[in-house]
Image: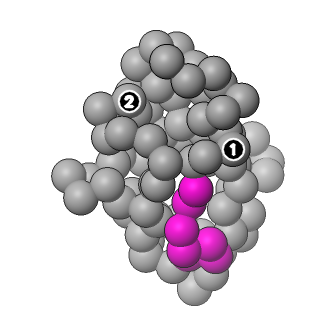
Amino acid sequence: MKKKEDLKREVILHPNPATDEVRISGMARMEVATIVAWTRSGHAISLREKQNGTVDVSHLKRGLYSLVITCWDGSMISKRISIRK
């Protein structure tokens, strides 16, 4: 099992900045329990990973978000993403 620090370094969100969808690379699909986008003002927006390993972000407004990925083992990974329209 990988340490949380190792996962954080290896997980990549691309493209970044994004417009419609983001791919999560560096972790198995089965590891992801939830994905939440946090706005700079502290609002949480739940996101769902698709079968192909992408996340639909087309409904998010332009701006910066913190994507928090919670794994089934309870570990959490936080990555920043920019949305452009």
Image quadrant in which the C terminus is located: bottom right
In this rendering, the answer to whether 25 lies above or below 29 is below
**Callout 1: 10 Å neighbours few (<14), some, many (20+)?**
few
**Residue 62 part of the magenta segment:** no
The magenta span reads 12-18
Q: According to the image, label 1 marks what residue? A: 9
Foreground of the two, 61 or 78: 78
User: Three-letter amino acid code at disc 1?
Assistant: Arg
Image quadrant assignment for residue 30: top left
**Callout 2: 10 Å neighbours few (<14), some, many (20+)?**
some
Foreground of the two, 36 or 31: 31
- Give x and y (percent) for residue 57: 46, 64
- Residue, x 42% and y 69% (percent of image)? 21
User: Three-letter amino acid code at disc 2?
Assistant: Glu
- Residue, x 68% and y 69% (percent of image)? 82
- Give x and y (percent) for residue 47: 42, 47
Q: Is residue 58 rendered to the left or right of residue 36? A: left
* N-term mark: 2 or 1: 1
Q: Is residue 42 rendered to the left or right of residue 22? A: right
Q: According to the image, label 2 marks what residue? A: 31
In this rendering, the answer to whether 32 lies above or below 54 is above
In the current view of this chain or complex, which residue is farthest to the right? Answer: 41
